[in-house]
Image (cartoon, rainbow, N blue to C red):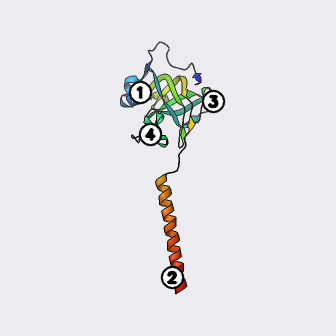
Amino acid sequence: MPALIVWAGTAPAAAQEQTVPVTELLTAPARYDGAVITIEGELVGDYGYRASGIVWTQLNDDSYVRAPLVEGGALTGANTGVGLRIPAAEMNGLSPPGGYRIRGPIVRATGQWRFHDPNRQGETYLDVASLEVIESGKQLEEGPNGLAVILGAVLVLAAGATLAQRRYARMRA
């Protein structure tokens, strides 16, 4: 059962919450400046813990979240993500972020969208007020690449044949 992680953060309670795809945020980020929004996706890269008690991380919302390449997903282009600012106390028990051979936790994050925040040197991010884990992260298993195994075997056999031929030629000389 997914865990619910909630933090009463800085998002204004009176604002109207709306769910926004990350691609739309990246297309028109100023449109949502100051709005309370919800985004969904995979936490990836690293959890950047700060002495201030805040964690910075990235949330990706692209086709690879639900269908990673190593599990047969299609190559559909670049990753699509935005930064999150989350209280460190709310990170307890959260799966490691996504990376090579790891699919990070899929979450629903709600908070105030900050576009070029002057208090954070112009950073653009979601100041998270609540975080819900939809699905825990998991290890991704990558099986052997059949073509690479066959080519490797052919190269080993070719090298063995070349060495045998040279040894035979030296013995005859």
Residue found at x 41% / y 27%: 21
**Amino acid type assigned to the residue bearing label 2 in the image:** Ala
Task: Tell me if label 1 and label 3 are in contact, CB under 8 Å.
Answer: no
Task: Tell me if label 2 and label 1 are in contact, CB under 8 Å.
Answer: no
| Residue situated in front as seen by the camera: 147 or 96 | 147
Question: Foreground mark, 2 or 1?
Answer: 2
| Among numbered discs 2 and 1, the one appearing first in the sequence | 1
| Among numbered discs 4 and 3, the one appearing first in the sequence | 4
Residue that badge 3 annotates: 93
Name the mark on residue 169: 2
Asked which secondary structure carries label 3, the reply is loop
Residue found at x 56% / y 34%: 137
Q: Position of residue 99 (x, y in %)?
A: 53, 41
Q: Left of 71 or right of it: where is 75?
A: left
**Amino acid type assigned to the residue bearing label 3 in the image:** Gly
Residue that badge 4 annotates: 73
Q: CA distance from mark 2 to mark 1?
A: 68 Å
Asked which secondary structure carries label 4, the reply is loop
Few, some or many residues within 10 Å of mark 3 (<14, 14–19, 20+): few
Q: CA distance from mark 1 to mark 3?
A: 26 Å
Q: Is residue 27 above or below residue 152?
A: above
Residue that badge 1 annotates: 21
Q: Left of 84 or right of it: where is 20?
A: left
**Amino acid type assigned to the residue bearing label 4 in the image:** Gly
Residue found at x 49% / y 68%: 158
| Among numbered discs 4 and 1, the one appearing first in the sequence | 1
| Among numbered discs 2 and 3, the one appearing first in the sequence | 3
**Amino acid type assigned to the residue bearing label 1 in the image:** Pro
